Image: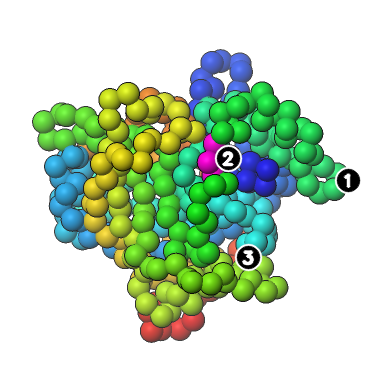
Amino acid sequence: MVVAATGFAFAGGWLTPGRLSPEQVADALERTNGHHPGFRRNHAKGVCISGTFASSAAGSELSRASVFAQSRVPVLGRLALASGRPDVPDTASPVWSMALRFLPADGDEWRTGMNSIPVFTVRNAREFAGLVIAGRPHPATGKPDPAVMQAFLKAHPATAKALATIKSAPKAASLETATYNSLNAFRFVDRDGGKKAVRWSMVPEQAASASPKETGSDPNYLFDDLIQAVHRQELRWHLVVTLAEPGDVTADPTVAWPADRRRIDLGTLTIDRVEGEDSGSCRDVNFDPLVLPSGIEPSDDPIPAARSAVYAESVRRRDGEPKQPSAVRTPPVRPGEGE
């Protein structure tokens, strides 16, 4: 249930006039998480990261996007918790996110946001708004009302099934050892105009710890651990794309594709700098999932369009608000430098 209340960005399917708007979804997030001026309405607690992407050249066979043709591309991004509370303790948020901007030399930018779960929990914007409302803390307990949540899940069996899939999946112990998944389907377009439906993941090169981490009383233990990890060494993830086969569902991200689908390593993301949002370059970036280069297109999955619209509404609200200090503060940290 905690996952249901905190885990996820947004869903689509609200374009019918008069039924649901980005403003209403943002309002639902604020009513559930509280109003925190200057912060994102979801994924509010995070840090800035930066580094490079080194293409394996395998992506050029699938997509004409220049990011796959250039040997090294600068990358800026953000690691965050999937919660609308900027002061939430790290132990309270079971879902983490990685958002990235690939900045190739020709300016054909690619932005993507990924989460540390195997499937999304809802199929459209209306279900997302309903899930947020169902997860609203009860005034008497400070926690979601189990009866309200059960009623929502009974009415939305796809979400109940997705939550079971998420619950059974392995859970990483740290931000740097987590796999981050696009969840939504997109289409790669090659030089001849051929199209393939894909989902992608960032798979860590860092080995998982053999023993659970000690969280102690540090409310920022995940981010403090990340900062220490970058101080020790560069962090690497592999961009792995999964190709759909005919009949695979692309419009419903609550449905996982079969495990035997072809997966291709498109290159290596190296992160060599982490910095607090107060001084970093990621705080005011809108990681709009529809900022796509030539060679990557949306599919019939409705969620990216909904995310794009709600992110824009979040940016609009933040632009007019005073900026508050972030919970995680750190000067720039590089391998072997300050901490």
Of 74 and 37, nearer the camera is 74
Q: Position of residue 308 (x, y in %)?
A: 46, 36
Q: Distance between the residues labelled 1 and 3?
A: 27 Å
Of the image marks 1 and 3, the number of the one nearer the N terminus: 1
**Disc assigned to residue 327:** 3
Point 81% across, 49% down: residue: 142
| Prevailing secondary structure of the magenta residues | helix
Point 51% across, 49% down: residue: 169
Residue ID for mark 2? 164
**Whether label 3 touches label 2, CB < 8 Å:** no
Residue range in magenta is 162-166
Of 241 and 335, nearer the camera is 241
Of 47 and 144, nearer the camera is 144
Point 40% across, 68% down: residue: 207
Of the image marks 2 and 1, the number of the one nearer the N terminus: 1
Mark 1 or 3: the one toward you: 1
Query: Vertical placement of 100 versus 250: above or below?
Result: below
Residue ID for mark 1? 140
Please tell me whether mark 1 sits on a helix, a strand or a loop: loop
Q: How far apart are marks 2 and 1 (CA)?
A: 28 Å
Point 42% across, 55% down: residue: 179
**Whether label 2 touches label 1, CB < 8 Å:** no
Q: In this orientation, does residue 329 appear?
A: no
